[in-house]
Image (cartoon, grey):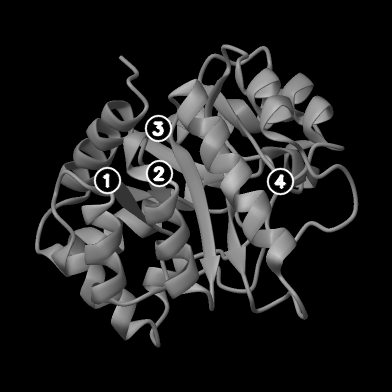
Amino acid sequence: MLIDSHCHLDRIDLKPYQNDFGCFIQEAENSQIDHMLCIAIDLESYPAMLDLVSGYPQISVTVGVHPNTQDGNDPSVDELVALGSQDKVIGIGETGLDYFRSEGDLGWQQQRFRNHINAAKILKKPLIIHTREAKQDTLRILEEERAGEVGGIIHCFTEDWEFAQKALDLNFYISFSGIVTFNNAKEIKAVAKKVPADRFLIETDSPYLAPMPFRGKANYPMYVRYVAEHIAELRGTTLNQIADLSTKNFNSLFKLN
């Protein structure tokens, strides 16, 4: 069985499933997807996202505001704690820093990141971290705010082994998306070979970043199998072994049965 540790189920294209979310869920089950973590990126669409997945025990959610989201509510620690206290919420995020899409004084982005970390520590729930062209500040803030107390995931990993080592030391797991299957992702492939067996996860980030051979097309949680297969090839093991290890790691991080 496979777990997609990062997807945006409220944003996927349901047309291939007759615009029926239940039909999509059935296809995921048929593809041996045991669990999906549906990630929030803003608070405006969060209630609808929660309503969409509320009837499915195989779907957990996070609550948070993506670092690139500038329109809408920028939540306080108290707001995040209130929303994050719900049973279906198992993590806080996605949060972090993105200096690729945002310009100017990014102090607001750093403060938002710190708020999420502090909420996660109060709730004792792991963080889902997005970082792009901001690796030094990301690591610095994680360390300053003692984020290692709750740990979490560096999602859609695109950095080098030096960054991975520091994140691991800060009690974070490394999650690989479909990017690891791309031919030009040599540095990410190298990291995927080295990450300890008890500290990696797999994800789709669907509907974005579809793996080979679907690159450039809509992505779905069922495609997490292609990520697992590629990592198995890189590490010289089997799909079943990668599926078992990543599932065990996910359950261990989020303290699930």
Evaluate if marks 2 and 1 touch, with contact meaning CB atoms under 8 Å apart.
yes
What amino acid is labelled 2 in the image? Answer: Ala
Secondary element under disc 3, as helix, strand or loop, is: loop
Q: Residues within 10 Å of mark 1 (few under 14, many from 20)?
A: some
* Label 4, label 3: how far apart the Cα atoms are: 30 Å
Between disc 2 and disc 4, the foreground one is 2
Q: Residues within 10 Å of mark 3 (few under 14, many from 20)?
A: some
Secondary element under disc 1, as helix, strand or loop, is: loop
Evaluate if marks 2 and 4 touch, with contact meaning CB atoms under 8 Å apart.
no
Residue 250 seen in render: yes
User: What label does residue 48 carry, if any?
Assistant: none
Name the spot of residue 117 as percent of width and height, x first: 52, 41
Of the residues under marks 2 and 1, which one precedes in the sequence? 2
User: Which quarter of the figure has residue 230?
Assistant: bottom left
Q: Which residue is mark 1?
A: 171
Q: Residue furthest right?
A: 71
Secondary element under disc 2, as helix, strand or loop, is: helix
User: What label does residue 65 carry, if any?
Assistant: 4
Q: Is residue 177 above or below residue 60?
A: below
* Label 2, label 1: how far apart the Cα atoms are: 8 Å
Which quarter of the rendered picture does the C terminus lie within? top left
What amino acid is labelled 4 in the image? Answer: Val
User: What label does residue 32 carry, if any?
Assistant: 3
Which quarter of the rendered picture does the N terminus lie within? top left
Q: Which residue is mark 2?
A: 147
* Label 1, label 4: how far apart the Cα atoms are: 22 Å
Q: Is residue 164 above or below residue 43?
A: below
Name the spot of residue 44 as percent of width and height, x first: 87, 37
Between disc 3 and disc 1, the foreground one is 1
Name the spot of residue 199 as percent of width and height, x first: 22, 47
* Label 3, label 1: how far apart the Cα atoms are: 29 Å
